[in-house]
Amino acid sequence: MSSATPTPTRVRRLPVLGALRLGRPSDVWFKPALSVVAAVAPPSLLLVVLGRLDLAAYTMAGSLCALYAHNRPYAARAKVLAWVVLGMLGGLAVALLAASLTRNAVVLVTVGALLAAVQKVMCDATRVGPPAHVILTFVSSAALFVPQTLGQVPGHLALAAAAGAWAWLVGMAPAPLRPHGPERRATAQALDAAAAYAETARGGEEGAGARSAAYAAVHAAWQTLLAAGDRPSTARRALERLVVRAEVALAAAADADPARLRAWARAVRGTGRIPRTGDPRRDDGGPRRTDSGARLDGDGPRQDGGPLGERDELVGVAAERAVAPRPLWSRLGPLAPVAVRSALGCALAGYVSFALGADRPYWALVTAASLYQANITLTWSRAVQRVVGNLVGVLLFAAVTPVAQLGPLALVLCILACNFGAEALIGRNYWLGSVCVTPLALLVTELPGYQPTGELVTDRVVDTLVGALVGFVAAVAVTDRRAGRRVERALTAVDHARERAARLAADPAATPAALEAARRALAAAVVDLRATADAAAGEWWQRALPQERVVLAEQAAHRTLAATVRRQGLLPGPGTTSTYTHTEGASP
C-alpha cells in the first residue's frame, strides 16, 4: 500500500534567525530565579563576612541545585533534589580528586569529557531538567582546573554539601504554603492546551501541531499527578477530573468550549479553591456553581466521602500508580549515541582549546556539552543560540566589571543579579539566558581574585567558538542511526495500544479500570510516537522515515481515543445531544 511506503526524509534546513526567535516566558519563570538567589546569597554573604570569598565557588556548586525540579510535585521534588545534590557531589568529588592528583590538562579534559557524557545520559534517562546536565557539567569541569591538594578535598566537598542541603530547603520551602502548586500548574497547562486545540478545530484548521501539544500537555499533567504520591486527596481528585475534561475536549474538540477550559485554567492557577466539575460521566445538577459554571470544592452536600465521591474517583489513576516504572537500564540503551557525542565532542573541544593556549579549556568543554539535544537540527539551533548569547554576554561582562571590582560585596551582588537574570530570561530563548550566564561564569572566576578583563573576554570568545564548532562537528560525525528503528518500535507500540483500547471499547464486559488504563496507555504511546518521530526527522545520515505511517497511526489512535472516551460515558454517542456541552455550559 502506498500509505505504508516510507517516504524519503529530507535533511531539515538549519535555521539561524528562527533559532533566535523569542518565545513566551514560562508560567513559573520567577520560581527558579528567586530560588537560586535565595540559595546562593546566604552562603556567599557569609563567606564575605568571613573574608573567604575564595571558597564561594564550592558553596555555589551546591546552591545551584536549587534550579532543579520546580515542575515536580513536592513529594517527588524532595527525592529529585536529593539525587541532584548527590549527583553534583559525586561529579565534584571526582573532579577535585583528579585536580589534586594531576595538573596534566589532557588528562583533566578527558576526565571532564567522560563526566559530561555520564551526566548527560543520566539526566536524559531520568528526565531531570531543566537545566539538566549543563549545571552539573559546569561545576565538575570548573573544579578540574582549580589547584587542589588531597587534604583540601573533604573540606571543599563539605562546603558544597552544606550549600546543597540549603538549596534543598529552598526548593521545598513553598510546600507548606501551596502544597498542590505544581499539580495545579500542570493541570492548567493541560486545560489551556486543550482550549488551543479546540479553537483550531472550530476554525476548521488542521491543528496537528496544536493537537500534539495538547496530548503532550495532558500526558504531562497525568505524570505530574501520578508523581504526587499514593495518598489521594480532595484537591488531587478535583484536579484529576479537570484533566479528564481536557481529554474529553481533545476527543470532541468541535463540541468543547475553549472559554470554559481557559476559565478553569485561570481558576486552577490561582490560590482559591479548585473548580469542581463533578462526575464527567454524569452531571445531574444540584450543587451551586461559579459564574463559569464550575462546581466548587466544598459546595453542596456531596463530598468525596459519599457515594458520589466514590463514583467520581478515577479508577485508572490507582491502576496506573500500581504499574512499576521502566527500569533505568532499559532507558540507557537508546542514549548510547548521545553519550558518544558528548564524550567525543567535549574532549575534542577541550583539546583544541588547550592546543590554542587557553588557560581554561573547560569553557570550550562546557560549551560543547551544552549543545547536544535530541537531534542534529536542534543541536545546531542550540549552537547558534550559545554563540550569540555568549558574544553578547562578554560585552555585558565588560560593562559590569568596574562595578564588580569595587569589592567582595559588589562582586557577590553582581553574581546574584546574573543568576536572577539568567533564570528569568532563559525561558524566552536559550540565547537570551546565556547573555546573563556568560558574565556569571566569568565573575565566578574572579572569586579567588580579580583578573584582567581583556584576557577573560578574549579567552571566553575563543573558547565559545571552539566549543560550538568542534561540538557540532562531533554531533554530525556521530549520527544516531537507530532513530528510524525507534520510530518503528513506537509505531508498533501505538498499534498494539490502539488494538487493545479498541477491543475493550467494543467489549460490553470491560471494566472501567481496564478502559481507563487502556486509554491512558494509548495516549502515552501517541505522545511518545510524536516525540520520537520529531527527534528522528532532525537526524542526518539515516534511512527514510515512514512519515505517512506515522500520520495514519496518529489519526487512527485519535479516533480510537475518542471511541474509548465515548464508551466510558464521557461523550455521547454519534448523533446524540452532548450532555457535556449542555450541562457544562459549552456552546452547542
Image (cartoon, rainbow, N blue to C red):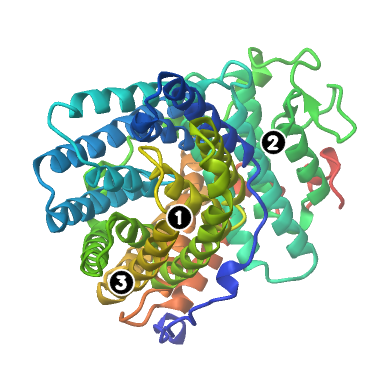
Task: Look at mark 1 in the image and give the residue it sits on.
Answer: 453
Determine crowd level at label 3: few under 14, some 14-19, many 20+ residues with C-alpha closer than 10 A. Answer: many
Name the kind of residue labelled 3 in the image: Val
- The image shows residue 11, relative to residue 90, as above or below, that is below
Q: Earlier in the sequence, mark 2 or mark 1?
A: 2
Q: Residues within 10 Å of mark 2 (few under 14, many from 20)?
A: many
- Find numbered disc 2 in the image and state the secondary structure of the residue it sits on: loop
Q: Mark on residue 470? A: 3
- Please name which of the two marks, 3 or 2, marks the residue nearer to the observer: 3
x, y percent for residue 537: 43, 74
**Amino acid type, residue under disc 2 in the picture:** Pro
Q: Nearer the viewer, mark 3 or mark 1?
A: 1
Tell which tag, 2 or 1, sits nearer the viewer: 1
Q: Is residue 154 left or right of residue 552?
A: left
Indicate the position of residue 335 as horizontal and vertical percent values: 27, 57
| SS category of the residue bearing label 3 | helix
**Quarter of image, res 146:** top left
- What's the distance in space between the residues labelled 3 and 2, CA to CA? 55 Å
Residue 151 place in picture, x, y as percent: 14, 26
Q: The residue under label 1 is which amino acid type?
A: Thr
Q: Nearer the viewer, residue 119 or 462?
A: 462
Residue 470 appears in the rendering: yes
Residue 280's label in the rendered image is 2
